[in-house]
Image (tube, rainbow, N blue to C red):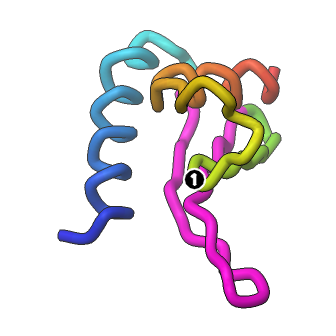
Amino acid sequence: MNVIDLIQTEVDRITSEKYKRDECPPVFTVSVLYEMNTHKIVLTARHLGTTVSEPLFPNFEMKYGYDSIESEMESLYNRTM
């Protein structure tokens, strides 16, 4: 299992627990974005006809460490409302 699969497994677990009562649950996808000799691990949320994405790693705006995956998911979810 590679790193993307491991993160996706955790994202799926969080989704099934946190959004199980949502009438229209969001779909979260972890992927890799390749850009000019670099790459980013990206989290995408699809919900209510809207799709938004954010890089999980690297994120150079994080000065005091990374937020939890659950926090990142909630932020994306809220932006689809």
Q: Splitting the image into 4 quarters, where does residue 5 fall?
A: bottom left
Image: 24 above or below 9: above
- The magenta segment is 24-47
Magenta-colored segment: predominant secondary structure: strand
- Residue 42 pos. (x, y %): 61, 56
- Residue 48 pos. (x, y %): 75, 32
In which quadrant will I find the N terminus? bottom left
Q: Splitting the image into 4 quarters, where does residue 13 fall?
A: top left
Query: Residue at horizontal 65%, vertical 42%?
Result: 45
Q: Is residue 76 left or right of residue 50?
A: left
Residue at the spot of label 1: 57
Camera-nearest residue between 58 and 29: 58
Image: 32 above or below 9: below
Query: Residue at horizontal 53%, vertical 44%?
Result: 28
Q: Is residue 39 magenta?
A: yes
Query: Residue at horizontal 77%, vertical 46%?
Result: 51
**Residue most extreme to the bottom:** 37
Image: 35 above or below 44: below
In which quadrant will I find the C terminus? top right
